[in-house]
Image: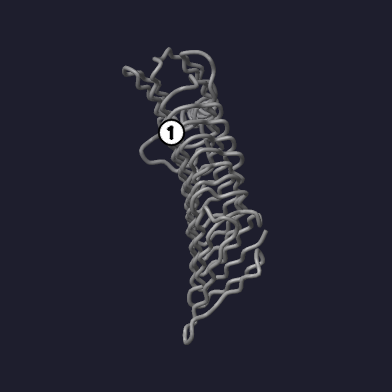
Amino acid sequence: MKHTQLLSYLTIPLILVANMALAAQSIDKQLTVDDNLKLNIKVLRGEVKVSSWDKNEISVKGTLDELSEGFILDKQGAQVTLEDKLPRHFNGNNKSGSNLTIMVPKHLTLNAEGLSSSYNLASLAGEIEIYSVSGNVNASDIEKEIFIHTVSGNIKASKLTGKIKLDTISGSITDKNSAGEISYKLVSGDLIANTSANNVSIEQISGDGKVQLKKVNELKVKTISGDITLAMTSLESRASLDSVSGDIELNIPKSLAANFNINGGPGGKIRNSLTDDEPKKEKYSPTSYLKFQTGTAGADIKISTISGSIKLSN
């Protein structure tokens, strides 16, 4: 009996040592890849950095999740799967996740996903898709097609170029110096952006936005229960801005040539500090409206609200 108890006591530290060894398990692997690389990354927890280099090779260095059941780096033709495999069911709130640095060719198709893992991406070109539930995503110097989605994680982007979609539910989006065509979607998070994109789409619910635009071809904005402030240098074609229970403020230069069609809707207010034109109301109607033209009108600006305010300024 005593011998059995002694073995049990000796076994406990051995288990602890094994767990510690697992927590500290390092990874250092390389794999030669094809020019048309399609890379799938699945890291559920931790920090993942993905950057480019001038080699037709993938390099993975760092440490695995302490709950890891094995590391997968598998190549099937041009497609590569990279995964830090975890148990199907786990509760690891107080455990450390993966910490990986991944070097890849600059031009690739990348699909990465995670639960609480945060992704940091830099200097890539291709079709890039990132999905994370509660992890943050930082992306810089990426071009061609970029789609980033989080549920409660924040998105920080800088110098993205091409067709861009940034989408979050309860996280925030910060974007600097993007160009091309961009779409922002937020449910309860805030948006701060300074973009050179020529086509811009914004959809937000219950969050506030502050967006600095430059030379825009087309602008679409829909906001519900959130306020948004937009500053625009010039408009080539059209802008359509709509709000429900939210305020819209549009700052534009007085020299901008456009046709303005503004509908205050029921319960809305219109304030025009851009020109001397004043809002009007139809007889027996609670709705205010404002129509006017600046310069030799070449663009169309349409703004409407329900129970919100619309402000024009320069």
Question: Count the marks: how many?
Answer: 1
Residue 301 in percent (x, y) is at: 51, 59
Can the viewer see residue 6?
A: no
Category of crowding for the residue at label 1, using alpha-carbon neighbours closer than 10 angstroms: few (below 14), some (14–19), many (at least 20): many
Q: Farthest residue in the bottom direction?
A: 284
Quadrant holding the C terminus:
bottom right
Question: Taking 83 as reference, is 164 above or below it?
Answer: below
Residue 251 placement: quadrant = bottom right
* Rendered residue at 57%/66% (across/down): 247
Can the viewer see residue 33?
A: yes
* Display colour scheme: one colour
Q: Which residue carries the number 1 mark?
A: 112
Which of the two residues, 18 or 155, is positioned nearer the viewer here?
155
Question: Taking 143 as reference, is 169 above or below it?
Answer: below
Quadrant holding the N terminus:
top left
* Rendered residue at 55%/38% (across/down): 179
**Left or right of 42 in this view: 63:** right
Which of the two residues, 71 or 190, is positioned nearer the viewer here?
190
Which of the two residues, 60 or 126, is positioned nearer the viewer here?
126
* Rendered residue at 41%/32% (across/down): 111
Residue 82 placement: quadrant = top left
Q: Farthest residue in the front direction?
A: 296
